[in-house]
Amino acid sequence: MKKTLSILLAATLVCSALPATVMAEGEEKVTLEFAQWWENELPEGKMAEIIANFEEQHPNIEIKLVTNPYSSTHDALVAGAATGTMSDVCGVDGTWIYDLSKMNALLDIDTYVEKEDKFTADDVSCVKVGGTTYMIPVVVYSYHMYANMTLLKEHGITELPTTFDEFLADCEEVNDPDNNVYGWITALSEAYPSSSQDQFMSWVWANQGSMIGDDGSAVFADDQAVADTLEFFKKCYDAGVVNPGIFSMTSSDMQDTFANGYAAFMLTTCSTINTLRASNPDLEFTMGAVPVKDGLEGESGVMYAPWGLGIAANTEHPDEAWEFVSYLLSPEVNTEFAGYANAFPGNTKSEVVSEDEAFANAYKIVQDNYLTNQMQGLPSAEELMKNLTIQSQLAITGDQEITESLTNAQDYWNSIIKE
């Protein structure tokens, strides 16, 4: 998805000033469940504020927030899809859409998009399976290399590394295992299902690599950037600059460790800005580009992941559910929401408004490169990512040759993708 977000950097927050509607006499109030993981990743109270504004303008609709961690939200949606008990409106990741659509769990929302007067299909990214729209991103996050400048400056490092060699050298400079300080904190763990996408493929895409070929099949064993990246991971692991919990950590574990000052570098989403600011206000950090191989020229791929909205097929109130989706995607509200989230808005008529310096750096990186994520819409995406995680672990520890791991992953992926 090359620079598909038509976005402008603004200095101030654009606040919604939409008129409130009046509930007709005798009109029954509808309660909608909204299941998501977003509330905990936004600044405290901001999700409640957005909901309150919606309810004020739509007095016939009440929103009941159901907030769980990311992985728990996924598990609950799958369980609800199997039993027809999904929440009316669901926060969804693009990697979940294929499987949920095959379970007939999500509502076809094309008709609603066609009739919408706040935006058009050209203003948003309609995520489709088989030509049918099941999800629209509310915001989009890019992934970048976080740098603990407090720790780096203590060792005389003031410039961010841009190449593999520079990155490893900086990691070795700050590495202090006796005090549990490591150059690089990362995770390739089955407890963190998307770790192979977030933590490994982000590096591959930055190095202009690919995991899916033009014919739609997996090409791990045939793409040199994939092999070079896995080899670099093993090199860093062998050098001892990677945290010892690499194969067991969750995303939250990784972020907490970085926030507490025990690592110089961490690769994760822009949403982590809010988490770090809240966890350790004294931590000086910034974001830079993912390092690339020496001599690489041209633009790099920057991984993105959406916070998407879908409507449950089992909802008894599809019109009211769409009213809520429409509200969050309206230009003014979408601008406000994206500003709270330190993210790019899903509606291209909205604006990028974060004043956070770290996010401004991330925004420039995106402008200079291109957004990509080949996992979006793949079948059984969770299982695919888990398989790649396991094969990567075996290669990094030396229990299996890199070529064997990549061939095994490629064969497994194609057995699913080509079904």
Image: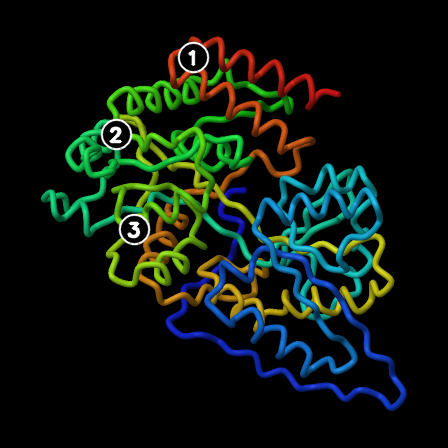
Tell me the residue at 75%/49% (across/down).
Answer: 133
Disc number placed over residue 402 in the picture, else none? 1
Position of 193 compared to 369: left or right?
right
The quadrant in which residue 290 appears is: top left
- Which element carries disc 3, helix, strand or loop? loop
In the image, is residue 28 above or below residue 342? below
In the image, is residue 199 above or below residue 239? below
Disc number placed over residue 391 in the picture, else none? none
Most foreground residue, 346 or 272: 272
In the image, is residue 157 above or below residue 19? above
Tell me the residue at 37%/71% (across/down).
Answer: 11
Q: Earlier in the sequence, mark 2 or mark 1?
A: 2
Question: Residue 16's x, y, as percent?
Answer: 56, 79
Q: Residues within 10 Å of mark 3 (few under 14, many from 20)?
A: few
Question: Residue 58's x, y, as percent?
Answer: 73, 80
Q: How many labels, in total?
A: 3
Q: Earlier in the sequence, mark 3 or mark 2?
A: 2
Question: Residue 306's x, y, as percent?
Answer: 57, 50
Disc number placed over residue 241 in the picture, else none? 2
- Per the image, the residue denoted by label 3 is 260
Q: Amino acid at mark 2?
A: Val
Q: Amino acid at mark 3?
A: Asn
Distance from disc 3 to disc 1, alpha carbons, whole Å, reads: 33 Å
Question: Residue 193's x, y, as percent?
Answer: 55, 35
